[in-house]
Image (tube, grey):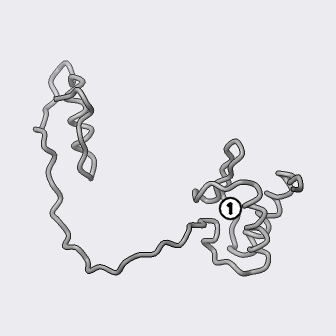
Amino acid sequence: MSKLDKTEVLSAFEAAYEAANGKKPEITTKPGWYSIDGGKNLRLADVAELTEELSSGKTTPKAAEKAPAKKTKTKTAAPVKAQKKAPFSVVTENEEGYTAEELWIVILARKDHDCRLPRGVV
């Protein structure tokens, strides 16, 4: 296994990505991992492979978001259900502010999806 130089690999990737997509990639670095444009985390060796693919022109612009192909069954579309209202009551703020329980109710009621209250609250 050869040693990869981080700066060389990342600069080569940036050049190949910019040539393929017309813009610079946004690379987020975490210890040992690299996320490209908010996509899946990749190791340095994977970034080097991706650089080779981009240089050869075999990939699409979204190649940085590698995802394994999944087999799916064809199903008929399920009817869309009406969004449920939160199971808790509406709370009004008083002069002293909210209690902890009331604050959670207000925060979760503002979200656009169905949420549960934390354990121990109501």
Name the quarter where the C terminus is drawn: top left
Name the quarter where the N terminus is drawn: bottom right
Q: Residue furthest top?
A: 96
- Horizontal arrangement in the rendering, residue 77 relative to residue 53 (left or right): left
- Residue at screen point 14% across, 50% down: 85
Secondary structure at numbered mark 1: loop
Corner quadrant of residue 55: bottom right
- Horizontal arrangement in the rendering, residue 64 relative to residue 44 (left or right): left
Q: Residue furthest right?
A: 2
Residue 16: x and y in percent read 78, 70
Instruction: From the viewer's side, name the closer residue of 66 and 62.
Output: 66
- Horizontal arrangement in the rendering, residue 9 relative to residue 59 (left or right): right
From the viewer's perspective, is residue 37 above or below residue 6? below
- Residue at screen point 79% across, 57% down: 10
- Horizontal arrangement in the rendering, residue 62 relative to residue 16 (left or right): left
Q: Residue furthest left?
A: 89
Residue 62: x and y in percent read 60, 71
Residue 60: x and y in percent read 64, 78
- Residue at screen point 64% across, 66% down: 64
Mark 1 Cα-neighbour bin, 10 Å: few <14, some 14–19, many ≥20: some
Q: Which amino acid type corresponds to the residue marked 1 in the rendered image?
A: Pro
- Residue at screen point 58% across, 56% down: 38
Q: Which residue is mark 1?
A: 25
Instruction: From the viewer's side, name the closer residue of 46 and 61.
Output: 46
Corner quadrant of residue 37: bottom right
